[in-house]
Image: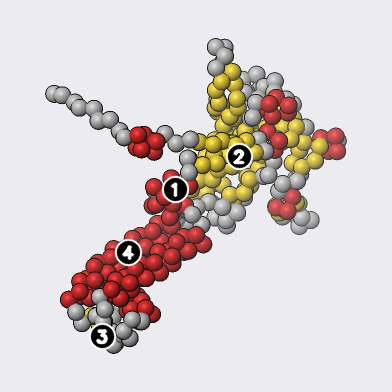
Amino acid sequence: MKFRLKRLSRKKQQRLILPIQIQVRDGKFEIMGMGVWHSYWRDPYHLLLTIPWAGFLLLICTFYITINALFALAYLIGGDCIANARPGSFLDVFFFSVQTLASIGYGAMYPKTTYANIIVTIEAMIGLVGIAVMTGLAFARFSRPTARVLFSRIAVITPHNAMPTLIFRTANQRRNMILEAQMRVYLMRDEITLEGQFMRRFYDLKLLRNQTPSFTLSWSVMHVIDEFSPLYGMTPESLIQTNTILIVSLSGIDETVAQVVHARHTYAANEILWNNQFADIFYHAPDGHRYIDYNRFHDVSPLDEML
């Protein structure tokens, strides 16, 4: 059995190899672009699912007006082919196209030539497909599960049970539970191997508690910095020099929709404060009840002020 190799053209090779610009901003890596902007349009389905609702509606409106304008020009080319439409009136044939594309059919205007009937047939088919696609995209955007999880703006390194410990906070902003919530924390930094090669290396950080049966209010995530920790022996200066960042990934099952939800956050080196401690957000009322004050969720203070 023989195989024949096909050589790609130079243009296709350039499409496969796209320059990636990486910029470091506040200690965080940002991918500025995969070549050029038009590369995002090569995956329109993903683009329409990920852009904000304002951009999604703007694109839909632009596409809707454009396609009706093109069919209106097609009707104008056919001359006086639409009954009860003013000859040469772009507005009349434009609104006739709107009625045809949406399958409204008031009956006031209708095609009266074979040419017009052919254009109407083509437009009706495009309208059916367009409605199905737009309905599917809108449903996919509405049905996609999302999590409203709040992460503290900074992380701290403070003693906990006589051991230096990395701590950050997270809270569920919805009044429901995230079941079987799991937390993963990764450390990423620049390293030089013994052979002198540069690499960007990932480490898994071991947490005191990486899962909870129900994530309802708040969760203080802790990583003990012992001799087995990748943070062992690190200083604030070395974190900045190695472009160290923390990547936090939270996943669980939303009890309301019974679907898996995800949340992600990153901490740059300058967002990790040493010898600081989070403010207490639990308030004990005189009647014995306990409350959580989320107004102090991001507040920290140096250890010498806590003593």
**The C terminus is located in which quarter?**
top right
Q: Is label 4 in contact with label 2 (beta carbons under 8 Å)?
A: no
The residue tagged 3 is: 83
Q: Secondary structure at mark 3?
A: strand
Q: Residue at x 60, y 25 (%)?
A: 190
Asked whether 271 or 211 is in front, the reply is 271
The residue tagged 2 is: 266
The residue tagged 4 is: 130
Front position among marks 3 and 2: 3
Front position among marks 2 and 1: 1
Left or right of residue 39: residue 4: left
- Give the mark nearer the N terminus: 4 vs 2: 4
Task: Report x, y in % for residue 59.
Answer: 45, 61
Q: Residue at x 29, y 71 (%)?
A: 74
Residue at the extreme left of the image, as rendered: 1
Q: Is label 1 in contact with label 4 (beta carbons under 8 Å)?
A: no
Task: Please rate how many residues cluster around mark 2, counting C-alpha atoms within 10 Å: few if below 14, some from 14 to 19, many from 20.
Answer: some
Q: Secondary structure at mark 2?
A: strand
Left or right of residue 61: residue 80: left
- Give the mark nearer the N terminus: 1 vs 4: 1
Quadrant of res 16 = top left
Q: Residue at x 38, y 59 (%)?
A: 137
Give the CA distance from mark 1 to mark 3.
42 Å
Residue 14 visible at all:
yes
The residue tagged 1 is: 38
Which amino acid is tagged 1? His
Task: Report x, y in % for residue 23.
Answer: 60, 37
